[in-house]
């Protein structure tokens, strides 16, 4: 449709290349990971499928390794959802194709075209109450078992909520035929709607949270006003204000897998509690729990402690050869940090962490999600009256004393 070279159709998706939460620079064509403070993890900057060879060029462009909030907003696009992983791969592969063949292009046009192609795949040219969606939805519906795993734990979890007096609802941007086919497969039941007090499709999130669009029934008659939710009826559209009024729900825990379209506005507009479903979490936790990772991390922390101690002793009385030793330890620190990065993803590292800081993506989760997990059924054995009390956050000047208090070692030290 966009008149790109036909050979691009032969490019193959590489699921191991990209991670979620990367930033794409419209002007430079660079794909990179940024931390929660806007700092670039320099060894993740890629142009096409290759790391940028001249890191100093990156520093010159941004006047260092920090990106200003204005530049982030005006010149960069963050790839936030699960669809971002193939999107980042496609951006990089097409960019590499152009580079290898010396084809002149502007990265912003490439990014715009990939975004538009993604929208067409999702929604096609239009989508109505009884439509399915774009080619993506049609492909999934034609082979549901290939894309969706049955989840009996989900059914028992939802039944447990309802049996204990909780109200449940499903709020989705997808069409009813697509959702119904998927839910029937996931739950192994055509009566899946009985698991929810209310089902809303084609919600147009995040517009749902801000608009005044009325609710509409999916089944006939579709043009009557909706003043209350009826059991067994599926609705579309609507808005957050009317939803809260008609359900009377004031204490809501809402789970979603997209930080921006699912979690930000319900927190701000209605004070809902939010839970983020982050599928990559399971694999990252598994990696972090391996003996090799724990050993390497312990070695890194030991090196950093030794460096701090060596710098504290660095004066005219310092031991001979200390400078050379510090230089050697710094080289070892760089090597170990690179090794820890690669165990998650060889190009970009962890979804959640740069080195010492959370990623830009992880910071959004921390800011707008009260709790996060890889699957909502992780809560199935948690008592329904359980309260998750947040951990205390320490400022740098508080960490030593409060850690000693928390571990009970303060009494031991005072006694000494």
Image (spheres, rainbow, N blue to C red):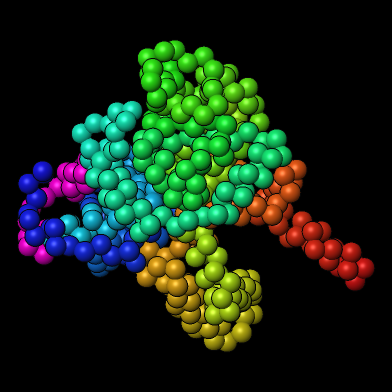
Q: Is residue 290 above or below residue 253?
A: below
Displayed quadrant of residue 220: top left
Magenta highlight: main SS:
helix
Give the residues in magenta: 98-118
Instruction: Tell me what residue is drawn at x 46 percent, y 23 percent.
Output: 239
**Is 315 left, or right, of 387 in this rendering?**
left
Residue 307, can we see it? no
In the depicted view, which residue is nearer to us: 301 or 141? 141
Instruction: Tell me what residue is drawn at x 39 percent, y 35 percent.
Output: 176
The percent position of residue 275, horizontal first and vertical second, equals 57, 44
**Is 306 left, or right, of 407 in this rendering?**
left
Q: Is residue 195 above or below residue 346?
A: above
The percent position of residue 133, horizontal first and vertical second, equals 29, 38
Please identify the residue farthest to the bottom as the structure is shown: 320
Q: Is residue 348 magenta?
A: no
Instruction: Tell me what residue is drawn at x 58 percent, y 18 percent.
Output: 245
The percent position of residue 333, horizontal first and vertical second, equals 49, 75
- In the picture, the quarter occupied by the N terminus is top left
Q: Is residue 92 above or below residue 305?
A: above
Please identify the residue farthest to the front as the structure is shown: 190
In the depicted view, which residue is nearer to us: 367 or 329? 367
In the depicted view, which residue is nearer to us: 305 or 126? 126
- In the picture, the quarter occupied by the C terminus is bottom right
Residue 89, can we see it? yes
The percent position of residue 12, horizontal first and vertical second, equals 21, 64
Q: Is residue 115 magenta?
A: yes
Count the labels in the image. Answer: 0
Q: Is residue 119 above or below residue 93?
A: above
Instruction: Tell me what residue is drawn at x 50 percent, y 24 percent.
Output: 240
């Amino acid at each position: 449709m966009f008149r790109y070279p036909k050979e691009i159709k032969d490019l193959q998706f590489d699921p191991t290349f990209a991670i979620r939460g990367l930033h794409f620079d419209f002007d430079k064509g660079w794909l990179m990971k940024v931390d929660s403070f806007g700092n670039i993890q320099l060894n993740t900057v890629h142009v096409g499928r290759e790391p940028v060879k001249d890191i100093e060029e990156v520093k010159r462009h941004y006047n260092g390794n920090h990106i200003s909030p204005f530049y982030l907003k005006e010149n960069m696009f963050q790839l936030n959802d699960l669809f971002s992983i193939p999107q980042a791969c496609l951006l990089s592969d097409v960019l590499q194709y152009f580079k290898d063949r010396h084809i002149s292009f502007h990265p912003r046009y490439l990014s715009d075209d990939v975004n538009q192609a993604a929208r067409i795949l999702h929604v096609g040219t239009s989508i109505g109450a009884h439509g399915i969606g774009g080619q993506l939805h049609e492909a999934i519906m034609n082979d549901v078992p290939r894309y969706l795993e049955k989840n009996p734990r989900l059914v028992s979890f939802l039944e447990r909520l309802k049996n204990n007096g909780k109200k449940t609802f499903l709020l989705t941007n997808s069409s009813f035929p697509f959702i119904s086919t998927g839910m029937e497969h996931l739950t192994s039941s055509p009566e899946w709607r009985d698991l929810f007090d209310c089902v809303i499709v084609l919600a147009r999130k995040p517009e749902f949270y801000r608009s005044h669009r009325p609710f509409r029934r999916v089944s006939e008659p579709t043009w009557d006003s909706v003043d209350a939710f009826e059991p067994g009826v599926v609705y579309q559209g609507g808005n957050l204000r009317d939803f809260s009024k008609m359900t009377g729900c004031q204490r809501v825990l809402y789970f979603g897998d997209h930080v921006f379209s699912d979690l930000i506005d319900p927190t701000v507009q209605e004070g809902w509690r939010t839970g983020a479903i982050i599928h990559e979490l399971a694999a990252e936790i598994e990696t972090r729990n391996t003996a090799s990772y724990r050993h390497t991390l312990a070695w890194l922390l030991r090196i950093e402690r030794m460096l701090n101690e060596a710098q504290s002793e660095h004066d005219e009385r310092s031991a001979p050869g200390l400078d050379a030793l510090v230089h050697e330890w710094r080289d070892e620190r760089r090597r170990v940090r690179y090794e820890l990065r690669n165990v998650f993803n060889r190009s970009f590292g962890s979804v959640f962490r740069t080195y010492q800081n959370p990623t830009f993506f992880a910071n959004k989760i921390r800011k707008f999600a009260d709790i996060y997990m890889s699957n909502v059924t992780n809560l199935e054995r948690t008592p329904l009256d359980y309260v998750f009390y947040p951990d205390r956050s320490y400022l740098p000047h508080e960490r030593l004393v409060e850690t000693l208090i928390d571990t009970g070692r303060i009494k031991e030290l005072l006694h000494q």
